[in-house]
Each structure stands twice: as structure tokens, then as C-alpha cells.
Image (cartoon, grey):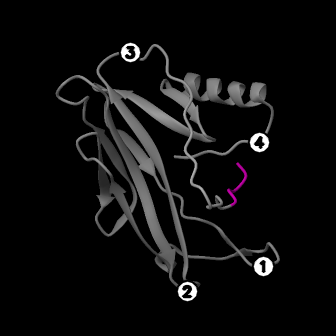
Amino acid sequence: MKLYFEGTREEIDYIVEKFRLLHNQEYTLQGGAIMFTVKADNPDVPYKITLPQLKDSEGNVIATKPEDFDFTVESSNPSAVEIVPDDDNDPTTGSVKFGGPQGDGTPNLGSVNVMGIHTPSGKGFSFGAQFTLVSGDVSDIAGGTIEFEGLTEDAQPEV
């Protein structure tokens, strides 16, 4: 899950802290997105995917149906985070099973990625969430960004 915020650093820190309290999870702001740090004994959690909203060139919302989208939901590393859809024909809901750290005790990393296309328009999309699996309580983690020279990030919807 990626959330995008606009505001002062204090406002963003306030929002991140509310997420920590509401969901009893560790969240870290990573380049405008939230990364989940999960202990190995974390129980399975349900997920729900909301497909993208389309707008025309004038900003009007275009009505869509789920069957207008051809998409996949995949894990980059099932030993860290495994996707279990409720229905193989409709992966928009299901649960996520967490693995644990690597055999040597170092954190295990994985991401859940949603990739697809709105078939009537041919417009592609992708979004996802990052997970770090650790063996114990996290005391602190901070920082980190990634930049790609010559690429411009797509505009993100306001939350």
C-alpha cells in the first residue's frame, strides 16, 4: 500500500503516528510511501485492492467495472510475503501470509505488486507495498529513497 501526503513534515509525522496507533504496525516513511516492518510471528492479514480510477482529459471520472481491468497480484518473494486470494478468478480480496527472516537471521524482504491494464483504454498501471520481515521488535529504522535518472514519477492521486 502506498499513500501519498502533502503537507509539512510535522503534519506527515502526525499522520504516520496515527497509522502506527490504529494498526499496531511499524510504518516508516520511505520516499513518500509507507513500508511495513513485520515480525515473523505476525498473523495473516486480509487485503483489499481498489482498482485505479480513470479520468478523461477534462478531469471527469470515467465509470468502470472490475471486468474492464486485466491485472495480476504477485509477491516478489513468497518466502517473505505470500498472497492468498479469496477467489482465484478475482484477486481483489484475500489474505497475506508472512514468512520470517532469512536463515542467517537477517531481515527478509518482499513486495506485493499489482500490475495491469484498463483494457478499453489501453492505459497501464501498477502499485504495491513493501515488507521487511524481522525476528523481533523493531527499535528504529529511518531514511532511504530511490531515484531513477531521466524518469519522472507519474502524478499520484490525492488521499
Q: Is residue 22 above or below residue 110?
A: above
Q: Can residue 98 be found in the magenta stretch? A: no
Q: Residue at x 57, y 29 (%)?
A: 143
Q: Which residue is mark 3?
A: 137
Bounds of the magenta segment: 155-159
Left or right of residue 104: residue 53: right
Q: Secondary structure at mark 1?
A: loop
For label 2, count other residues whose C-alpha is less than 10 Å away and answer few (under 14), some (14-19) or many (20+).
few
Q: Secondary structure at mark 4?
A: loop
Q: Amino acid at mark 4?
A: Glu
> What amino acid is labelled 2 in the image?
Pro
CB contact under 8 Å: marks 2 and 1: no
Residue 104 spot, x, y in % from top left: 19, 24
Measure the alpha-carbon separation of dots 2 and 1.
16 Å
Q: Is residue 159 above or below residue 20?
A: below
Q: Earlier in the sequence, mark 2 or mark 3?
A: 2
**Residue at the farthest front position:** 149
Which residue is nearer to you in this view: 139 or 43? 139
Query: Closer to the N terminus: mark 4 or mark 2?
Result: 4
Residue at numbered disc 2:
120
Q: Are marks 4 and 1 in contact (CB under 8 Å)?
A: no
Compared to residue 92, the image places residue 130 above or below, namely above
Q: From mark 4 to mark 2, how far is it between C-alphas?
A: 32 Å
From the image, tell me which residue sits under label 4.
Answer: 6
